[in-house]
Amino acid sequence: MSDVGPPASNPDALVQVRNLTKHFDTEDGLLDGVEFTNEFPYVSRSTETVRAVDGVSFDIVEGETLGLVGESGCGKSTLARTVLRLLEPTDGSVYFQGDDLASLSGEPLRRKRKDMQMIFQDPQSSLDPRMKVGPIVEEPMRAHGMLDEEGREARAKELLEKVGLDPQHYNRYPHAFSGGQRQRVNLARALSVNPDFIVCDEPVSALDVSIQAQVLNTMEALQREFDLTYLFIAHDLSVIRHISDRVAVMYLGNVVEVADKEELFEHPKHPYTKALLDAIPVPDPRSGGRTATLTGDVPSPIDPPSGCRFRTRCPKVIQPAAYDLREDAWQNVLRFKRAVERRAFEETAPDVLRRRYFADAVPSGAAGTVLEEAFDRLERGAWDDAERLLTERFTDESVCATATPAYEVEPTLGDGRHYAACHLRRDEATASAVDDVTVEEPARSDPTALDADD
Amino acid sequence: MSDPLLSVRDLKTQFFTEDGTVRAVDGISFDVHEGEIVGLVGESGAGKSVATASILRLVDSPGEIVGGEIVFDGETLFGLEEGPNDELRPREEMLSESEMREQIRGRRIAIIFQDPMESLNPVFTVGGQLREFIEINRDLDADAARAEAIDMLREVGIPAPTERYDEYPHQFSGGMRQRVLIAMALACEPDLIVADEPTTALDVTVEGEILELVTDLQSKYDTAFIWVTHDMSVVAEICDRVNVMYLGEIVEQAAVDDLFYDTSHPYTSALLDSMPRPDETVEALDPIRGVMPEAIDPPSGCRFHPRCPEARAVCREVHPEPRDLQDVESTHTAACVKHDVFDVGYDESAPIDAEATGGFSAGFTETGGDAE
C-alpha cells in the first residue's frame, strides 16, 4: 500500500497525499514522562504518542477546492500543516507537482514553498502589527527574490485592489483594518508569489456572517482568476457546502469519507458524516430543528479505539456475529452499555434497569445471559466489572472493532468517486481495502490505494 | 398577555472615551415574558453584550447606563428621575448595588458567558465551585450542597458525575464546561437566564446537544431566557421571539416564524441572504455591502442606510423608531420607513446609490469584524 505513488494513482492530481501520518511524542523536555514508582529503580519513563494524523490519503486536482471538515481536535490543522511540510511527517508522502515534499529539504523545499501558501484562521495574529500592509504583502516576494523594489510595490498595490482593498491602504498598519479586511490582506500576501495551491485553515470562521460572505465571494473570484487550488478547512458545513467541489470528512486522525460535494451532502454513507449533517442548524424555524444523534466527546488520539475509530460514538455499531438480535434489541443493548459507561443512572435494581432500557425489546439467548450477568454486577455496585463485561462481550467482538474499514461505493449523484470507511457499506462496496486489526498496527484509511486495482 | 417578567424601556448605555462618546446601546426596548426564549441577534459590535450587561448592571467604567428603565418582576433594576436641580438621579425604588448582588444576580437572573474557561476558576475543582455557589445562594450546608451539585451535574449530562466532581476545569472539554455553567446557572432555579453566545465556541454536534439540553431544561423549570447570538440558525432553532440589533438599536422585533417568513427590515433580509445554507447548495452568496460603522459616529437618519440595498434619499434624513406593522394580536415591529405606517414619503423619494463603495475603501477605522 505504501508504494502507491503518483504514477499508479491519479496522475493529474496537483497534490497527492499518501498514507500521511503525523504523531507527536508527549515527551518534549528532559523530565517529561518521568514517573516515580515504588520499586527499583524508582523512576520510569513512559512516552505517549498522540496520533494526530494517522494514515491519510487523498488527491486534490488542479483548480478544485477540497473541503476538509471535522470536529475540533480531529487533526484538521495538523494535516494541513503536514501537507505543506510545516510539520515533519512521521510517515507517508505528499506529492506536489510530482515531487515528494516529505523527502525534500533545504533550498529545494524552500523554492517549492513559493508555489504553496497558507491562510490562517486568526487574521489578527497572522499579521505583524509593526509592519505596514504593503511590506507585509511584499515580504514573500522578497523572500523568493521576485521582482525589484518598484515591481514589488506595484504588484502589492495591484493585489490589494484584487482582494477588494484600496491600494491607498498600502501604508497602513494592520490594526487599522477590520477582521474581514485583515483576512483580505492575508489573501493578498498569499497570492503575491503567484502560488498554485493555497491551504486555507478556517479562513472565515472568525468573521461575522455578512463579512464571511464577502470574503468567500472574493476567494472564489480569485480562484477563477488565478487558477488556484484550495484545500479549505472549516468546521462549518454550510461554508464547506458553499465553497467546495469535493469534501473530505475527518475523524480522530482518519479520513472517514470522501465524495463530491452534492453526493456527500445528499447521500452520506458514513454514520459520522450523517451525524455531522444532522447536527447543522438550518436557518429556518419551520425546518423542525436538528437531531443531535452524537453523544460524548471525541476520544483521545493517544489511544484511539481499534478498528473504526468512530465506533465508540457511532449509533450504528454492527452487532457481533455471535448474536442474532433484532435491531431494536441491539440498539437497546448499545444504549444501555453507553449509559453504564457514563454512569448515567443511580438505581441499579435489575427490574428498574430492564424497564428503563429494555422495555420494548429484550435480548434473548446468549446476549440475554450476558445482560443478566451485567445486571447482577451492577446490583453489587461493581460498575467497572459490569462495564468491562459489556465491552468485552458486545462491542469488542463487533466487526467495527476488529477490522479497519475502507470501502469504495458507487456514487448516487455524479460520476466522482465515493470513499466511505464504514463496515455498513461492505455489501455495496465496489472495492475495499479492509485491514484486520493487528496489535500496534496503526489504523489506516487509504481511499486512493483502491486505485491500484482499477 | 400578563405582565412581562422583564421589561426594558429605552435603555441607553454609553462609553465615554477619549475619542468621544460611544453610543453602544441607544434606546432599545423589549420584553421577556415568563418561560419564553427571547433572541438578541446581530453582528459583532451591534451592542448585544452591552445590552445584556446593562440588564444586570454590570457595565464598567468608562461605560454607564445613561437612560431608560429596567423592571424585573416588579423590582426596578434601573430607573432615573429628575432631581430638584434638573439633574438625573437614581429613583428611590431602584435596587442598590448590594441588593443587586444579593437578590438578583445568580439567584433570580443568572448569566452564562461565551467562554466557559474564563468563567470557571482553574485552580478549584469543578464540583467545589458549583457546591460553593449553591451553598451561598441557597443556604444549604456543605453536604447537602455537594449532593445537590452532583445531582445538577448529572442533570446536565456530565458522565460519571461523582468521579468528575473532583476534577479541575482543564480536564473537561469545552462542551462539558459549558454544561457545568448551565448547571451553575440553573442551580438556584432563577426566573431568567441570560445566555451570551454560549455555544459560539463549540462544534455543531456539541452545540446541538447543548441546545437540546437547554430546551429540555427550559420546559422542566419554565425558565425564561435571553439568548444572545449572531447565528440565525440558532435563533431559528430555539427562540420564541427575536430582537434584531444593528448599531445599538433594535431594528426588528417579531415572533421567530414571522421574522423568517415575513421579514420586514432590509437588514434582517440581508443577514439571512448572506448565510451559506447547509441544506441546499447556493451558487452565489449575496453579502451585505461594507462593514458596520462605529457607534461613536453613527450615520444620520436610518443607521443602516449606507449599506441598505433599498435606501432612498429620505432614509438619510428620517430616523425611524420601531413601529408595529400589524394590528393583529402578535406584534411585529420594524424600524424602516419603507413601510406605510411611517408615511414619510419613501415611495416618492429617489433611490440613493449606497455610497459605501464596497466598504473596504471607506472603512478605515472599522473594527466591525473583530471578535467581541
Image (tube, rainbow, N blue to C red):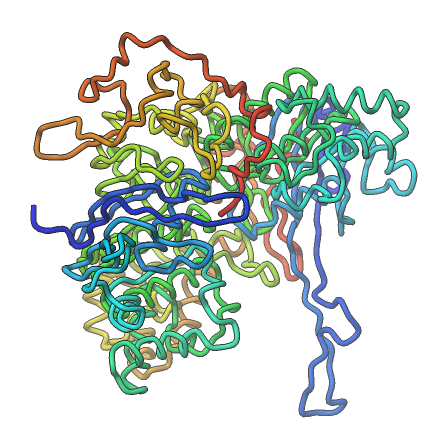
- Residue at figure coordinates x 40%, y 21% from the top left: B308
Q: Position of residue A409 (x, y in %)?
A: 51, 31
B350 or A5, nearer to the observer: B350
- Residue at figure coordinates x 59%, y 52% from the top left: A436
Q: Quadrant of the N terminus of chain A?
A: top right
A318 or A221, nearer to the observer: A221
Q: Quadrant of the C terminus of chain A?
A: top right
- Farthest residue, direction front: B85
Q: How many marks?
A: 0
Q: Position of residue A176 (x, y in %)?
A: 63, 37
B153 or A391, nearer to the observer: B153
Task: Judge from the rendering whether residue A421 lies leftward or rightward of residue B155; answer left or right.
Answer: right
* Above or below A34: residue B340: above
B207 or A351, nearer to the observer: B207
* Above or below A310: residue B91: below
Task: Judge from the rendering whether residue B232 lies leftward or rightward of residue B362; answer left or right.
Answer: left
* Above or below A301: residue B253: above
Q: Can you see residue B129?
A: yes
Q: Position of residue A229 (x, y in %)?
A: 67, 25
Task: Judge from the rendering whether residue B372 lies leftward or rightward of residue A176; answer left or right.
Answer: left
* Above or below B345: residue B290: below
Q: Position of residue B1 (x, y in %)?
A: 7, 45
- Residue at figure coordinates x 31%, y 79% from the top left: B136
- Residue A177's image quarter? top right
- Residue B133's image quarter? bottom left
Q: Can you see residue A410?
A: no
